Amino acid sequence: MSNKTQEILSVYKKNVMPTYAPSVVISSGKGVTVRDADGLTLYDFTSGIGVHNVGYSNANVVEAIQNQAAKLTHSSNLFANEPSTRLAEKLVSLSGLGGKVFFANSGAEANEAAIKLARKWGSANGGRYEIVTMRQGFHGRTLATVAATAQAWCQEGYDPLPVGFAYADYNDLESVKAAVNEKTVAIMLEAVQGEGGVTPATEEFMKGVRALCDDKNLLMICDEVQAGMGRTGTWFAWQGYGVEPDMFTLAKALADGIPMGALVTNAKLADTFTLSAHASTFGGNPVAAAAALAVIEVIESKGLLAKAVEIGTLFKEALQSFVDKYDKLLEVRGKGMMLGLVVDAEAKEIVEALKNQGLLALTAGANVVRFLPPLVLKEEDLEEAIDMIDDALDCVFGEE
Ligand SMILES: *Cc1c(COP(=O)(O)O)cnc(C)c1O
């Protein structure tokens, strides 16, 4: 760690609350790499936690942001703006659900909107309010989304949490059925659990949840904040399962790092939020919306849905070869460019070794190393990254 990094981190430690513990200072990014404060280049296989699906500083996105910033950065939702209106039209069309969009500013807020909408609908449909969520799921850090996140580390110290949530085991339909009662209004889940360990739902489970919702008149809510926007090879991960949710949420990759969240519904729920029923000062911000429209154009023009599958398959095969090589590596999981390496070790130790080789990765719980590379990753960069991963694993486990 040299001077500039050390200097910034020491100011950080004095002034920023210690909810994170960064050891790298990022000063710029281009494509699949970032540069730290001292000019060192690193591969970013976190994409800023699933945000830069089209790569850092994509020229089209940068241009869209600059042009829109010069024209109008904000006008409030008392007035419409063209970028967010066009974006709503585009998201409705990509979803194929025939509904409408509510814009928020983050994943937690988009999920908060989904929870409120489910309750609004439930209040008029049998006075129901309870939402079943999945253990190991993750839905955000506001009080309601923490209550929806059935993980102790997220909830500790925040009692009393909002009521109205029940928990079930992921990929276990019987457990979900057992959690449903006369108060239940919705089932909320990720099609691929991100923070909870990079675990994809089985097709049987997703179809079973949909059938259960149809049978009991419940709403199916998909949290696509991490898996959405092409990461798993379809626009939204639920599209890979042959089921349609009643609503789903987006954020992370939606606007390439300009804060933006969205709730997208089907036709049935399109007008459940009536005039003044919900609101956000910044929601649908025109700069964020212009960025999101550019992101969608780049994904379309570069064929990134197919690329996520293609390069994700190569990456998965390489990780699988490491599982075959090292006893301490147990399994590779995930879909497309959302991959997890399950280890019989401390995942953070491996993430640290990867960083020392020049590659940024994430953990997902204590025992999963999570990779969320930009979808624009080229084969030659993947090959170089795989060598770095091999070297890092050698450092941690020794040559085998
Ligand atoms: C990151 C994440 C959230 C929370 O998003 P924020 O923008 O941090 O509020 C919610 N759900 C999932 C699945 C996520 O990965």
Image (spheres, rainbow, N blue to C red):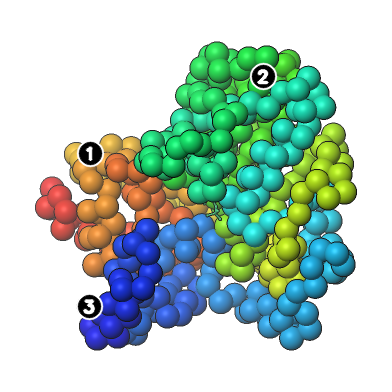
Mark before the other along the chain sequence, 1 or 3: 3
Q: Can you identify the residue that label 1 sits on?
A: 344
Q: Compared to 170, does 276 lie above or below? A: below
The residue positioned 22% from the left and 53% from the top of the image is: 349
Report the amino acid beneath label 1: Asp
Label 2 sits on residue: 183
Callout in the foreground (1, 3): 3
How far separated are the C-alphas under marks 2 and 1? 41 Å
What residue appears at the point 41 percent right and 66 percent down from the top-left corner?
Answer: 44
**Residue drawn at x 71%, y 48% as measured from the top left:** 263
Give the residue at mark 3.
1
Taking the image as drawn, is residue 87 in sight?
Answer: yes
Left or right of 395 on screen, residue 16 = right
Q: In the image shown, does 61 or 250 lie closer to the viewer?
A: 250
Looking at the rendered structure, the secondary structure element under dot 1 is: loop
Mark 2 lies on a secondary structure that is loop
Residue 206: x and y in percent read 61, 28
> Which is nearer the N-term, disc 3 or disc 2?
3
State the CA–CA distance, disc 3 to disc 2.
55 Å
Q: Nearer the viewer, residue 325 or 26?
A: 26
Q: What amino acid is labelled 2 in the image? A: Lys
Q: Quadrant of the N terminus?
A: bottom left
> Foreground residue, 385 or 149?
149
Badge 3 crowding class, 10 Å Cα cut-off, few under 14, some 14 to 19, many 20 or more, is: few
Q: Where residue 340 sits in the image (x, y, percent)? A: 39, 45
Instruction: From the viewer's perspective, tell me whether residue 175 is left or right of residue 207.
Output: left
Q: Position of residue 149 (x, y in %)?
A: 50, 38
Of the residues tagged 2 and 1, which is closer to the observer? 2
Disc 3 marks which amino acid? Met
Location of residue 380 in the rendering, given as x and y in whole percent from the top left corner: 42, 67
Which comes sooner in the sequence, label 2 or label 1?
2
